[in-house]
Image (cartoon, grey):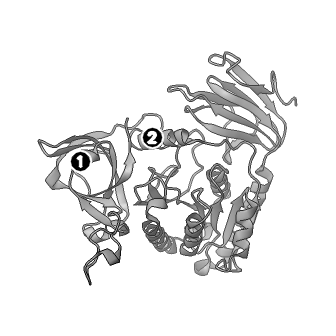
Amino acid sequence: MDETKGPSTINPSSTNSSTEVVEWNLKPEHELRIETDDGKDKSLKLTLKEGTAELFGCELLKGHTYEFPPSSKFAVFTWHGASITVSSHAKMVYVSEDTPMLSYVNTHDILDKLRFAAQAKGKEGFGPRLMIMGPSDSGKSTLARILLNYAVRSGWKPTFVDLDVGQNEITTPGSLSATPVEHPVNVSDMGSISLKAPIVYYFGHASPSPYTNIYKKMTERLAASLTKRMDALDIARHSGVVINTCGWVEGQGYELLIHAAAAFKVNVMLVIGQDRLCNQLKSDPRIAKMVSVIKLGKSGGVVERDADYRRKARSRRIREYFYGPSGELCPHQKVVQFKDVNIYKVGGGVAAPSHALPLGAKPLLDPDRAVKVEPSVELMNMLLAVSFSKDPNTVLDSNVAGFLHVSNVNMEKKTLTLLCPAPGPLPERSLVMGTIKWTD
C-alpha cells in the first residue's frame, strides 16, 4: 500500500483546502497527524474508507464521517494499514512512522495484568492506580484517553481523574474531578470526556500556584470521595484509576505531584519525555518501592500551545458545558436576588504577618479558605459553582452540583442574571467563585 496519494504534507497556506478532499493511504503502524484551522465554524471531516484505524485508542467505524471542531490537534493511527479521506479546513496534515503507540499498547498490557491480579483477590484487590506526569504539551491527556479506551475495549470500567485545573477534560476549567469511564471516549469530542456521575471540586483558578494548600486539600477530598465510591463497586476497584496531572513539574509543582500520589495511593507513575523528572521520582525517598516509575517517549506529533491557545481552549470548554460540543444543549437564564444566594471566593486574601497584629490576634483574611463576598460588578462574566454545602465553613470541603455563568449584574435592582444548564430552582444557595471568567 502506498503511504499517501498526493503530497506527503499538506499546508493550506499554499493550497486551497476549503473544498479539497485528500485520500491518505497509511502503512501499518503509521499515523496521520492533523491540525484544523483556528477560525470559527471551520470544522474538518474525516472518513475511514478501508482498513482499520483508531483515534485516542478508540476504533473508527468504516464509512462513518467524523467531524472535528476548529483548533483541534490529533493523530489517527493504524496497526494494519488504512485508507482515510480528509476534507475541509485542515491547517496541517502529514504522515509519520515515528509514533509511541507500541510503547503505549505495551503499557496497557502491563496495566491489564495488574487488573487481573486485583480481580483474583476479590474484595481485597485494587487495580492500577496510575498517575501520568510530564511538563506542559508532552501529551499527558492524549495518553490518558488512549489507556482509558484500551481498558474499556478490554471489558474494564476504569475511573478517570483529572487534576489539571487549567485544561480539565471532565468538566470546566478550575476543577478537580473524577468520573467512571464505561464506554469509549467519543472520537469527535475533542474537548471533554463524557460525564457519568462525576465528582467535582471547584478550585476556581487556572493554576494551582495561587493557593497550593487549598489545591492539596481538594485533592485529598477528591481521593477520599473516590475511594468511598470505588469500595462499593468491584469492577471499578479492579479496573483502577488513570490520573491526569498539570504540567507544573518543578518546585512546588513537583511537591503537588508527590502529595497527589500519596492521596490516591498511586502504584504506577508514567513520565512522558523528561529524564530529569523520571530520575527525580526514582530517587525520591518518599516514593515507596511498590511504586513503579516508567518513562515513555514523547510523541513527535505533540504541538506546543501558547497562552492564547490555552485561553481559547478554556473558553471553548466552558461554552461546551452550557451548550454542548455541537450546540445541542439549551441553557436557561435565571434572575436571582442578591439576598437569595451566598457567594464565597476561593482564597480569602493575603493574611497579614503575625508580627503586624496585636498580641494574640489572628488575621481576618486567610488565603487558605473561602471568604463570603458581597455581590458586585466584579461578578460580571464570572463562572460560579453551585456547592452542596449548607455550612459556609465547609464550602471548600464539598463537591459541586454544577456551574452557572453570570451574564448580568444589576446593582440598582440587586439582581444577578445567571446562565444555568437546566431550568428550575438552584440546588443550593451557596455559590463558589474564583478568578475564571467567560465571555460568550
| Residue 424 image label | 1
Dot 2 crowding, Cα within 10 Å, few <14, some 14–19, many 20+: some
Residue at 53% x, 74% y is 263
**Looking at the image, residue 26 lies above or below residue 360:** above
Mark 2 is on which residue type? Ser
Residue that extends furthest to the left in the rendered view of this protein: 413
Residue at 75% x, 44% y is 300
Residue that extends furthest to the bottom in the rendered view of this protein: 360
Helix, strand or loop at mark 2: helix
Residue that extends furthest to the right in the rendered view of this protein: 1
Going from the N terminus, do you reach mark 1 or mark 2 first? 2
Mark 1 is on which residue type? Gly
| Residue 327 image label | none
Residue at 60% x, 56% y is 247
Q: Give residue 110's position: percent from left, percent from top.
A: 75, 65
Helix, strand or loop at mark 1: loop
**Looking at the image, residue 409 lies above or below residue 198:** above
What residue is shown with label 2?
A: 315
Q: Give residue 353's position: percent from left, percent from top.
A: 35, 73
Visible in this render: residue 178? yes
Residue at 73% x, 65% y is 278
Closer to viewer: mark 1 or mark 2: 2
Question: Which of the pair 63/131 is nearer the observer?
Answer: 131
Using the rendered view, name the quadrant where residue 113 is placed.
bottom right
Using the rendered view, name the quadrant where residue 342 is placed.
bottom left
Side (left or right) of 411 relative to 224? left
Visible in this render: residue 64? no
Dot 1 crowding, Cα within 10 Å, few <14, some 14–19, many 20+: few
Q: Give residue 20's position: percent from left, percent from top.
A: 67, 17
Count up the numbered dots.
2
